[in-house]
Amino acid sequence: MIRINEEIKKELSDIIRQDLKDPRINQTMVSVLNVDTTNDLKYCKIYISIMGDEEQKQGVIDGLKSASGFIRREIARRINLRNTPELIFKMDDSIEYGIRLSKLIHDVNSNTEDDSQ
């Protein structure tokens, strides 16, 4: 399953980057963070991170959901699986959360250095 998940993740990243023409998706930076496929290959949860405001995030999710048939067909063509799973896109804000924490730590450190001088 780990190998299948990694292969789906690689192909999905390639499809999003090169093959999708939806302007909602191409305007923002979209990263595929994790793929979790069920053992029976019926469903595949795809965790994605999107840099942008809430409106852009919702637009990307809507664009991916509307293109899920095309994406599923492309994955079936590129990867030889018994069943091609149904794709479920989930938002993952961990990258934005990490960036925000890093910025807060940097701000605290710079304020501490300013106070000590």
Image: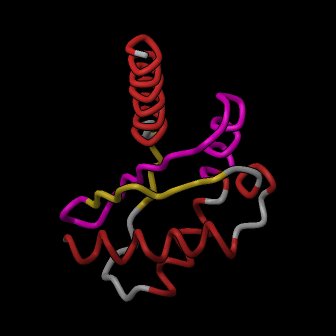
Would you say 86 lies left or right of 53 here? Answer: left
Magenta stretch encompasses residue 81: no
Residue lying at the far front in this picture: please name it.
Answer: 117
The answer to whether 30 appears left or right of 114 in the picture is right
Q: Residue farthest to the top?
A: 115
Q: Residue at x 40, y 36 (%)?
A: 98
Residue 109's place in the image compared with 71, above or below, is above
Give the quadrant of the C terminus. top left
Q: Point out residue 109 in the picture as x, y percentages from the top left corner.
A: 39, 24
Residue span colored magenta: 38-65
Numbered circles on residues, count: 0
Place of residue 116 in the rendered image (x, y in percent of width and height, measured from the top left): 38, 14
Taking 36 as reference, is 112 above or below it?
Answer: above
- In the picture, the quarter occupied by the N terminus is bottom left
For the residue pair 14 and 61, the one nearer the viewer reads as 14
Residue placed at 48% from the left, 87% from the top? 78
| Magenta region includes residue 46 | yes
Q: How is the image coloured?
A: secondary structure
Residue appearing at x 43%, y 32% in the figure: 97
Residue 50 location (% of width, % of height)? 57, 45
